[in-house]
Amino acid sequence: MFLHRPLLLATLFASSATLAEAPPAKVATCQACHGAAGVSIAPDIPNLAGQKATYLARQLEAFKAGTRKNDLMAAMAAQLSPDDIKALSAYWSSLPPAPTDAAATAPHAATVSAMTLPKDFPQGFVEYKREQNESTQTLTLRYANKLAVEAARAGKPLPEGSILLTVNYAPQIGTDGRWTPGPVKTYVGMETRAGWGDTIPPLLRNGNWNYGVWSADGTPRLALQQPRCLACHQPKAADSYVFTLAALKGAGG
């Protein structure tokens, strides 16, 4: 679904843009997912380089207005002014549609997570929420380390050193229908440490939170997904970037 604008809009982008004309921090946000030169290395993320500026502007306007649905892009576009949209669209349109060197297609620093699967888990962690999904036959248990639990219960922002870990299990179902954890399917986590947000563009940054996904044997599976995690959690800034903060506040209570 696209927004319609007068054809006169096309004249706004007649001249090429330089990086100086586009907000550098906002260009960097685009680069985190769409590639340093606007050429994506992810199979499901489109290229921006060489696209028509009017088209790019209309997509950003549509994401911002909510008439084109994508939760991650909506979170990013909501932070853009009309001038930002104009400058970014002109900038990406001005770039060649093919990268000029290998560095242009290297993963952005924001895709690199510093988080590792906690070696001592579940020691030092508190379960604070569990969910059953009948359709996927998954039992999900949510855990937090004691530092995060104590801060949440005190009504304080989650401090550096907080770790939240979600574990998806194949359930064991008793004769009474009760679900208990069986084999682990996957681990999903978020952790905040000083300096971990330094390489992440401001529009994406979740304080100093980094994210992680691991298979049952602990093999990392996050790959290029961290910018999407950041974009998804970014609107929850008032809740320490945590969707389940209300449940966490009641942990152990």
Image (cartoon, grey):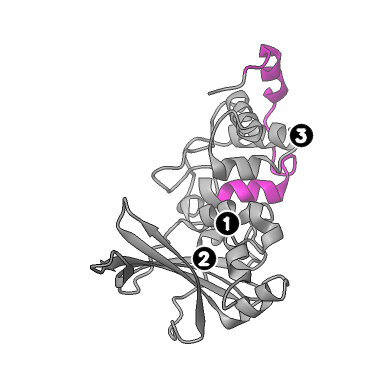
Check the image and report above or below for 62 versus 213.
above
| Mark 2, other Cα within 10 Å: few <14 / some 14–19 / many ≥20 | many
Which stretch did the figure color magenta? 4-31
Image mark for residue 62: none
Tell me the quarter of the image containing the C terminus. Answer: bottom right
Left or right: 98 in relation to 247: left
- Determine which residue is flagged by label 1: 230
Check the image and report above or below for 6 versus 207.
above
Tell me which label, 2 or 1, sits earlier in the chain: 2
Question: Tag 2: residue type?
Answer: Tyr
Mark 2 and mark 3: Cα distance apart in space: 32 Å
Left or right: 207 in relation to 221: right
Check the image and name the residue furthest to the front: 176
Q: Residue at x 43, y 84 (%)?
A: 119
Tell me which label, 2 or 3, sits earlier in the chain: 3
- Give the x, y percent position of residue 141: 43, 68
Q: Are marks 2 and 1 in contact (CB under 8 Å)?
A: yes
Between residues 233 and 38, which one lies in front from this camera angle? 233
Question: Tag 3: residue type?
Answer: Asp
- Give the x, y percent position of residue 35: 52, 48
- Give the x, y percent position of residue 228: 52, 52
Left or right: 128 in relation to 178: right
Between residues 223 and 132, which one lies in front from this camera angle? 132
Q: In which image quadrant can residue 240 be found?
A: bottom right
- Determine which residue is flagged by label 2: 211
- Determine which residue is flagged by label 3: 83
Check the image and name the residue furthest to the top: 7
Q: Residue at x 67, y 75 (%)?
A: 153
Q: Is residue 14 magenta?
A: yes
Task: Determine whether the residue tagged by mark 2 lies in a helix, strand or loop.
Answer: strand
Please name which of the two marks, 2 or 3, marks the residue nearer to the observer.
2
